[in-house]
Image: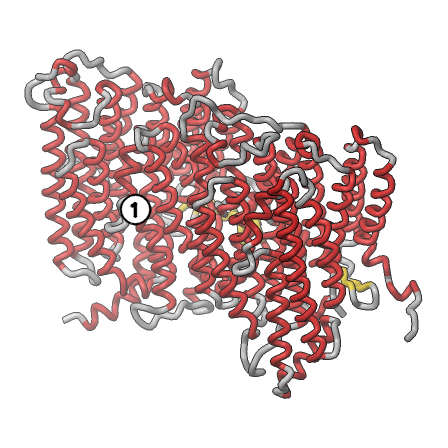
Amino acid sequence: MESLSLTTITLFLPMVGLTILLFLNEEKQKGAIQWTAFGFTIVTFVASVIMLFGFDSSNPNLQMVQRNDWLPSLGISYYVGVDGISMLMVLLTTIIMPIAVLSSFTTHIFEERGRIKLYYMFMLLLEWAMIGVFVVQDLIIFYIFWEITLVPMYFLVGIWGGEQRVYAAVKFFLYTMAGSILMLIAILYVGGNAGTFALPEILAKLQSGEVSFLFDGVFSTQSFLFLGFLIAFAIKVPVFPLHSWLPDAHVQAPTAGSVILAGVLLKMGTYGMIRFNLTMFPEATVAWAPFVAALGVIGIIYGAWVSFAQTDMKKLVAYSSVSHLGFVVLGIFSLTPQGIQGATLQMINHGISTGGLFLIVGMLYERRHTKLMAAYGGIWKAMPLLGGISLIVSLSSMGLPGLNGFVGEFTILLGALGSDVLGIFFALFATTGVIMAAVYMLYMFQKVFMGELDKEENKNLPQLAWQEVAVFVPLLILIFWIGLQPTGWFNVMATTTEQLVANMTPYIAPLVAIAP
Amino acid sequence: MTIPALGDLNLYAALPAIFLALFTTFLLIIDLFIASEHKNNTAYLALGALGIAFIWNLLTFNNNTTAFLGMFVADSFSGFLNMVVLIGAMLTILLSMDYLRRMGIEHGEYYSMVLFSTAGMMFMGSANNLIVIFIALELLSIPLYVMAAIRHQDVKSEESGIKYFILGAFASAFFVYGAALIYGATGTTNLPAIFTAVGDIVNTGSDSIFYLVAGAALIIVALGFKVAVVPFHMWTPDVYEGAPTPVTAFMSVGAKAGGFAALLRVMVVALPSLTVNSSDAAAVWQLTIAVIAALTMILGNIVAISQTNIKRMLAYSSIAHAGYILMAVAAAGSAGVGDASTRGMLVYLLAYTFTNLGAFAVVITLEKEDGSGTAIEDFVGLGKSRPFLAAMMAFFMLSLTGVPATAGFIGKFLVFGASVEAGLIWLAVIGVLTSVFSAYYYVRIIVNMYLRDTDKPAEVVGETPFVKYATYISFTAVLVLGLFPALALNLLGGAQITLASLF
């Protein structure tokens, strides 16, 4: 028996917690259920930090690898390990999860809907599946984890969501499943040709020329495989015009569900693009990059525009996600080290700031039972602490220099400007998104927190409970840390991204040669 | 004509099936002496016989021998298939015991019928000769006609039996006609010998090819009827809805397994090289079967969406699943894909058997004596009143959808894989797209159980011990197969029904 790698331990800690939850009594041990769930998300976080300390950032290859046979006759194995990008994604997951769990302590959803045990079981199941998506290196097992994330999220929205929860949950399930199942065909084709489903082995065979996917134009075998993966990921991100499930899911999801959805689940899509599209189909990536990046830019502008028109705070934040993730897509398909690093950092930034915004909206909703901006005004006077926190989070979300959002967006724009596959217009249009973000974020902040405290119901809102303050502490630390000292974060993924881009350079170079 | 010595028949290879058939004959007599209030004893005896046959089959799993002078073959394909149908039959008996009493239709003969039909399925999987396939087909079908109509007080059940019988008789006739044409073209009914003859016919460009193609078409029609693929599926919803629920469950898994086994064996052993030009890469029947598979998946899934009765929904779902399994048969039409498609089909059948019987077990739990309780609306609130039962049902539904970590996913994965390997990518794409449609109606059950509020949650009337056992067994199997598919695949070993394993 091979010893367990740290990756496996981190991956399965949430499952241990889930198993313990199974044996707790729903009626009598409510506190124990909450604290067990919270405890295990914290333990998982600690494990991931230990992973980070054991991680050698000068090594671009997979680390803390473990591999066991699962279906040897078909070349499928349980194969886990992390490189710089996965490491950061695992950290993001393990940071967001305790926050999401802790934020559920103070909600009132259980008074009406009950089933508190099931809720926390789904939370832990979700954490397990999300970490799984980020660490597995086998295409089939990746697909399995990818699909499993659907199930707990479906129930979180469907059972504990808002008025239209069933509609939103079913739409979420069908929409994402429709995308990912085409990926299965692409996976089967790739694995069938390569004789293995282990990504590192497939990449090695591609490098040595033992396996190749025909590329002779924009519509060729490799392009279809590329699109099979891309569509699945694009729906998850979501890239314009495949985003229509997102506002519904976000608006209907319980607060913790929205935090996880924005914080981690959407990142699975952008992570997948980096991990699979860029590595396995370099020629198709180069050929399709302008198209995908253009969709990213459209998403930036469209998301910002639509955000501005919203009256519902949660919808506004949801559409702002479309805009922010447009930046990430642009960064990835600039195919430069800066762009990809900025995109990866921006994934984390978006998890922090949008997660924070959803928490704020959730807390206001708990107190006033409405998400309409018009019902608020002058809240700073009633809840100064929440007002202060909201100001910082909003500024972070719109990318104020000195806070985290700026670093990510700036690096992405640098990458887009220096890109050999994208023209200057991409960066130019994307920049307008930064300005528009300031407009809609400040608009919301002003409507809710500024002005006169003129509505009677708002005058006696209860102050933040300690759990509610506690959830913001790690977020605020990260906002300033990444904003002021981003070097360490870039270092973790630097070698991984450089190697990634180096592998693609042969395919980009001809473009540079013919460029005027 | 000489009469072969008993020793030459090599009965040993066929003993599990022979044992089952013989025991059933005795069971009919023993049953006469069992008082009507103790009919459970008959069921125990039947279960025991199935258990013995099951163990016997495992012991003789990889024999690769023939019996009855080459008319019957025992290879790992038939071994695995026997396992599937025996499991199906055992679970069916568990489901039937309390149900029949509850509904007031308990007859001792019922269990003998199940066993006879099971023996038919076992012969079907091993048949290496068109005549044997025909006999096995009848042995499989006739008890099912009776079982469908066993609740004869109910006009729906009667309709179900008669409909199944008349259409089944037509299908048998088609089969015989097809077999006759093939015999006319090749001069033999032995499948490997047909293979040799087909090779000659194709190479010489003889006109007999037309008889062969017509014969193959008629056989596809006949077996397509048994496994309920479009456009030979019309009987399915009415028969499934009218028949007593355990019978429906048995038909949906057992008859399907038998039918597909024979279809795959005829196509892969006898007719793989049936091409119009000897240089064609794929057999002439591949496209036909692929189109039928595509139509079946599309129609089955789309019509299932609009059903309001769960038995009818599962009937259409079983049509859809026949389409997925048929993908494997279509894939076998390309040279070199025979093994992958055999494997895919067998694992799919195993996964489907457990999943579908599990789902039917839950339906039986909810079904009331007057036949109500099977509307999809009746599942509302089950998640609140019976959380664990609902969780198992939800799991079965996810498995039918093919969500990973369930047995259903492994089956779909292998079948799609075989189809991609055979170059039928368009078929695989239709397969995955229709899987998404299917998610809609499977997930609706989950929606009803968990997400909809109600004042009066679903009533559970039939949660008797045996039904519970069947549900737990199915649930465990679906979970274990989903997480550790290597267990089934290892048992399968190199299951193949290529010629090499027959000589």
Q: In this view, does B400 lie above or below A282?
A: above
Q: Is residue B379 left or right of residue A311?
A: right
Question: Which residue is at 73% across, 49% downward?
Answer: B143
Residue A336 position in % (x across, y down): 24, 56
Q: Nearer the viewer, residue A428 or A400?
A: A428
- In the picture, the quarter occupied by the N terminus of chain A is top right
B80 with respect to A77 (left or right): right
Which amino acid lies under the numbered mark 1 shown in the image of this protein? Val
| Picture quadrant where residue B48 is located | top right
Q: Mark 1 points at which residue?
A: A237
Q: Is residue B378 left or right of residue A453?
A: right
What residue is drawn where x is 34% and y is 37%?
A: A167
Q: Which residue is rendered at x = 38% and y = 33% of the image? A: A158
Q: Residue furthest left?
A: A452
Q: What is the basis of the colouring in this image? A: secondary structure
Residue B219 visible, this angle: yes
| Residue B115 % position (x, y) | 76, 46
Q: Is residue A433 above or below residue A294?
A: above
In this rendered view, identify the residue nearer to me: A23 or B213: B213
Q: What element carries label 1?
A: loop
